[in-house]
Every structure is written in C-alpha cells, then in structure tokens.
Amino acid sequence: MSHSNSILVLGAGELGMSVLRNLAKRAPSSGLAVTVLLRPSTIHSADPDKQKDIAELRSLGVDLLAGDLVAESAAGLAARFARFDTVISCTGFVAGTGVQLKLAQAVLDAGVKRYFPWQFGVDYDVIGKGSAQDLFDEQLDVRNLLRGQDRTEWVIVSTGMFTSFLFEPSFGVVDLARNTVHALGAWDNAVTVTTAEDIGALTAQILLAEPRIVNEVVYTAGDTLTYERLADTVDAVLGRKVSRVEWRMPTLEEELSEEPGDPIRKYRVVFGAGRGVAWEQDKTFNARRGLDVAGVEDWMRQHLL
C-alpha cells in the first residue's frame, strides 16, 4: 500500500520538532507532504529560539499553517483539517482541559483518514478514570470517541514518560542539585521512559509501517527500570553516591491534598501508584523491529556529562 499522503502535525514543541524532523527526512522517499500548524504569534515571533525553529522547518521543506487550537472551535479546526490525510497531535497538556477532545472531534468531523492523538505517555486504559491526574480522564474520553467510530483510523503511541522528565528539577525524582534520587511509591516500582528524539523517529516508522497499523495502541520503550536501578545508574554514570529517599504513597497523597491543583504532585501520585506506567521492553514496537533506542544511561551520557 502506498503511504503517499499529506500530513498535518499539530505543534512544534520538543516532541513536535522531533516528529517533523523525522517525517521530513522520509518525505522524499515516502511521498509525504508535511505541514505544521502553529499559532500566528509563533510563526511571526521575534524570539530567537522560535525564529531558529521556524527557519529549520522551512529548510526541511515543512509547510507552515497558521491556526490556534485553543481559540478556534471544533468546526473551525475541522475546516482546516479536512484537506489532510493524516493528523498527528503533538500539543501536550499545556493547551488545557477539553482541547484534546475538541481536536479528536474536529478530526472526525473533517473526515481525516488517520489520526495520531496526543497520547504519547502512559497506558490510560490501565490507569482508568478517576486518577490523581484529572487530565488523564479526558485521554480516556478521546480513546472512547475514536473507538466508537469506524471512518477514521487511529493509532495511539504509548511511550511512557519522556526520559528527560525523570531529571526535571520540579518533578524531583532525580534531584542532582541535592544529590538525591526519590522513589515514587517504592524502590521496586518501575517506570517506562522514551526520549523525545526516539519518539519522533518511532512515530514516523509506525506511520509508515507495513503491514499498516490500524486502530491499535502501539508501545515503545527506551528503558523500563525501577527507581532502585535509576539510582544505581545515576551513581555509576556520574561517579557519585546519591542519597536515596522513598516517597511513599501516603506522603505523596498528603502533599497533593495540601495543593490539589498542583500538576507535579498529581503526576507523582499517579506514578507512585505504579499502574499503567511501565511495560516490558521486549513487547514494544522498537524491540520487535530491532530498532536502536536510547536508555536512561545513554540519555545521561549525552546530556549530563
């Protein structure tokens, strides 16, 4: 089957840029025409970093489409989406409540042939409704909407946590400034992670895979490791002995109750519960295809040494 089609990527943040780079790389040989939807303020921004990204996108042959996913209605977005065969959402949760469901509805209303929703994260089916992170409930609503129709093909790419987020100071799991690694829930709790670079490359390969992947949740993993192994890895790679502190669930839940709107505390509780946040690496798309991906140690050597 030919994959020659027009692709619209929503957003050009860390993941969006990675997806766009990998799609553009394959465009000449795969017959892809790649477009990215960005806010007008981003396209015309004087910010040097944004100017650099825009210049890179133009050099890659990516077309720019101005639009606002938050401000525009589902009907307005559907009119924009209608000329594309595939839509890939790389918007993340920063857009706010209701946006992911609006995007999915707009894709369906537009008659788009194939949709990759923003589900680049945990296994929401296993976590279920009512978790500490209320944004996850909407992710399940998106899945139910897509599963309840048969006009638009969908592909969900479950990647686990972005590897870099393990080392995000605000998240507090690896706190290099305090030379401490915190375990969420328990030391033997596991977490699956994939780098943004690998997610971009794997998403492009999943899109072009033969036989065609249709109406399926596809799993990736750069690494699946316990918090104990994470602490051991930090010690070994950085040549230090970190302090190890276990954040048990009662502590995480109490902290969330003190600031129930804090998104970081919500994430800590979800990952501390340990459900739907880790899967075996040998069952992933990249493992089955024999594709090289970066583990936590690889990421650390690239970014921390």
Image (cartoon, rainbow, N blue to C red):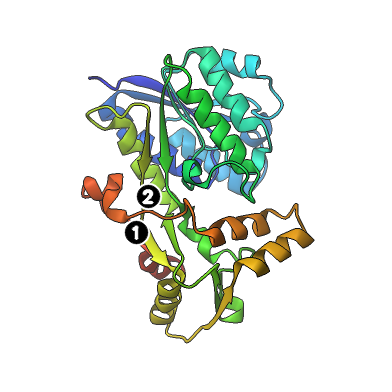
- Residue type indicated by callout 1: Ala
Q: In which quarter of the image is residue 99?
A: top right
- Residue type indicated by callout 2: Asp
Q: Mark 1 points at which residue?
A: 294
Q: Residue furthest right?
A: 258
x 30%, y 48%: residue? 284
Instruction: Give the position of the N terminus as an image quadrant.
Output: top left
Q: Position of residue 264 (x, y in %)?
A: 65, 57
Query: 293 or 53: which is nearer to us?
Result: 293
Quick one: SS at disc 1?
Answer: loop
Query: 298 or 56: which is nearer to us?
Result: 298
- Residue 66 visible in rendering: no
x 58%, y 55%: residue? 270
Relative height, residue 124 to residue 211 (above, below) = below
- Residue 108 visible in rendering: yes
The crowding category of the residue bearing disc 2, from other C-alpha atoms within 10 Å (few below 14, some 14 to 19, many at least 20), is many
x 43%, y 81%: residue? 235
Quick one: SS at disc 2?
Answer: helix
Q: Where is residue 148 in the image (x, y as percent from the top left)?
A: 48, 20
The crowding category of the residue bearing disc 1, from other C-alpha atoms within 10 Å (few below 14, some 14 to 19, many at least 20), is some
Query: In the shown orientation, is residue 204 left or right of residue 74?
Result: left
Q: Mark 2 points at which residue?
A: 198
Q: Position of residue 97 (x, y in %)?
A: 68, 36
Q: Do the residues labelled 2 and 1 touch (CB within 8 Å)?
A: yes
